[in-house]
Amino acid sequence: MSVPRPARPPTAGPAQPFVHPALFYADALQYLAGTVPFVRGALDAGEPVAVAVPGENLRLIRNALGAEADAVRFVDMREAGRNPGRILPGVLHAFADAQPPGLRVHIVGEPVWAGRTAAEYPACAQHEALINAAFQGRRVTILCPYDTVRLDARALADAHATHPAVIPPGAATHRPSRAYAPEDVVARYNEPLPPAPGTGPGVLALAFGADSLSAVRNLATEHGARLGLSGLRLEDLTLITSELTTNSVVHGGGTGALTVWAEGGYVVCQVRDRGRLTDPLAGRRPASRDQRGGRGLLIVNLVADLVRTHAGRDGTTVRIYLAR
């Protein structure tokens, strides 16, 4: 499919180093007309560019670029971004932070696609909102495509609220979003999670403190094996349990409650404590080389298939999903 080279893609002025437009598209032609010139504009300027989108769209862009695709970093977002909490540290920062200083970094990132589950979507919306705070002041442009045909009205409305600029279907340039309110989106999706199952067959529910961390970790691992985890996935559950329960003891009032159960094709591990999680970017920033501690939530985000968090006045709940 041939895609022409229209005018240069969205750029930023001196007062606006970070650019984060939402690209709305209704079909493959509009998708390529919005993304391929963006990629080519970066290549023509000699600047680094990455494309992190679902596999089927990855193939569209790669094929349209032809030989130019060799200079682009491609990432299948269905794999790397299955957990939306992993995208900032594991995809966007991983690429942007590796580039030479002084160059503008360009990324096509598509974290919201038709087929995202009801459990995943709130974390996606929060991720899109938090991008703005994570890259504020940096010479980075992140173009986020949104399918106007297959996504529901809520996702499209949230895209206007999480992106300071929008590109309507078929348009060549972006305009300011009148609905831009990322902090409101973060707060709105900080919603109480559905109740965990009570005690019963297949459910492990334990209270813990500093003196029982090792025993709780072992019990969670044994229960995860009974629920169908094995190999690396079982090791991931052990690591996640260790990080979350330790966080509760150190930062969450010294005690907490652990619940492990099966839900669909996942093993779910939840930890509740009395801590107040006030930083919405906690666990989403890459760790610096000399950083001591503070890596627990980051490790959990990088390992889990999904992480959901609710932070309230009476404490914090972290719920993770591991595919069986």
Image (cartoon, rainbow, N blue to C red):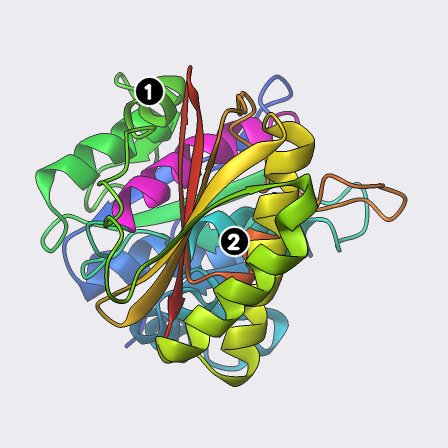
| Mark 2 burial class by Cα count in 10 Å: few <14, some 14-19, many 20+ | many
Label 1 and label 2: CA atoms lie apart by 24 Å
Q: Amino acid at mark 2?
A: Arg
Amino acid at pointer 1:
Tyr
Q: Secondary structure at mark 1?
A: loop
**Residue drawn at (14%, 36%), measured in percent from left and top?**
154
Q: Residue at x 33, y 20 (%)?
A: 180
- The quarter in which the C terminus is drawn is bottom left
| In-front residue for pair 227/139 | 227
Instruction: Name the residue carrying label 1.
Output: 180
Where is residue 4 shown, x and y percent of the image? 35, 63
Q: Which residue is mark 2?
A: 86
Q: Residue furthest right?
A: 290
Question: What residue range appears in magenta?
Answer: 120-139
Residue 285, horizontal then vertical, whole percent: 64, 41
* Residue found 33% across the figure and 18% down from its top: 184
Please check the rendered image and state whether residue 231 is part of the magenta-colored stretch, yes or no.
Answer: no
**Label 1 environment density (alpha carbons within 10 Å; few <14, some 14–19, many ≥20):** many
Reply above or below: 313 against 285.
above
Lateral position of residue 30 relative to residue 58, left or right: left
Horizontal and vertical percent position of residue 297: 59, 45
- Quarter occupied by residue 204: bottom left
